[in-house]
Image (spheres, rainbow, N blue to C red):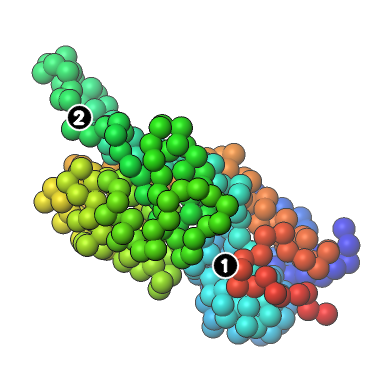
Amino acid sequence: MSSTQTQATVLIPGKLHPHAVSRIEERFRVVRIERGDAALLDEEARRAVRGIASATVIDAALIDALPNLEIIANFGVGYDVVDAAHAGARGVMVTNTPDVLTEEVADTAIGLLINAVRELPRAEAYLRAGRWSQEGPYPLTRGSLRGRSVGIFGMGRIGRAIARRIEAFGLPVSYHNRRQVEDIDYRYHPTLLSLAEAVDTLISVAPGGTATEKAVNADVLAALGPEGVFVNIGRGSTVDEEALADALRSGTILAAGLDVFVDEPNVPEALMACENACLLPHVGSASVHTRQGMADLTVDNLIAWFTEGKALTPVPETAHVGQKR
């Protein structure tokens, strides 16, 4: 173990995957606090912290309170809980965990789509309640994947993985992104509304933040039409949940499959009451295999930074940041 590693202190605010914690404790000095609040640290600890490993909110106030902070290793591909722009301005590296969860989350998106269209959770509940033997076969589902056209909101790594799976079903794929992606042939729509008007199935993989807040609104849902299906595997904040509940209840769209919500773990009662919504407790990447891979990449970013002076997976806002000397 190098002297640089033994001298570096890493802050772990809140809960973090136990495999990540174990590896960090083997390589670094560790300070743990209940949440990302600088008031929970004394002056000595604030000055000692050079790295953060977290899956929780890291705001500008905490970043500013740590004068020797060099790197924030975020557990998760989405990093909207970290003020990455402020970190970049302060010369602090931010990393995330892309790729290792891409295929798992894409699989979950397809599962949500099939569940929503074919009502599989409701059909299982029908069987378990003894209704198959008492009442006969489960009613034919109005929805089907056959003949659908699919739009993807957010054509990043996960969006591409979902698109490949959709293609395997023999369905056409279109997308909306902040900008057109040059190396793919899917049809690009410059606005989310135009995408929704062109398809009947919308899968959101968009990141959170002010730019996407409530982007999937009443107009977008209405554009999908009465056979429309909406799936969200990205961030709950991208959806107007009240408008979505109204659209499901009124028949404006056929069904929805949701793995993410605005105020997790609190799911709006209006959505809970919609039988045509398949609701999951944010399990997109929640397999032992994938979460361990995410934990390893979180720690590997810290090790690479403090031993080699570079991060493995820097986020765009901090790609310019070099190691402090």
Residue at point 77%, 60% (across, down): 303
Quadrant containing the N terminus in the rendered view: bottom right
Left or right of 65, for residue 57: left
Q: Amino acid at mark 1?
A: Pro
For residue 312, say whether it is visible: yes
Q: Quadrant of residue 316?
A: bottom right
Q: Position of residue 20 (x, y in %)?
A: 65, 53
Assign the C terminus to one quadrant of the image. bottom right
* Percent of width and height locating residue 284: 45, 46
Helix, strand or loop status at disc 1 = strand
Residue 192: % across, % down = 34, 61
SS category of the residue bearing label 2: loop
Q: Which residue is mark 1?
A: 13
Q: Position of residue 9 (x, y in %)?
A: 73, 70
Is the residue 289 above or below the residue 212 in the image? above
What number is the disc on residue 281? none
Can residue 38 be seen at all in this image of the molecule? no
For the residues labelled 2 and 1, the Cα–Cα distance comes to 47 Å
Q: Residue at x 48, y 64 (%)?
A: 179
Q: Sort mark 2 into few (<14), some (14-19) or many (20+) by Cα contacts within 10 Å.
A: few
> Of the residues tagged 2 and 1, which is closer to the observer?
2
Residue designated by label 2? 141
Query: In terms of image quadrants, where is residue 69?
Result: bottom right
Q: Pick whichever, 48 or 221, lies toward us.
A: 221
The answer to whether 142 appears left or right of 55 in the picture is left
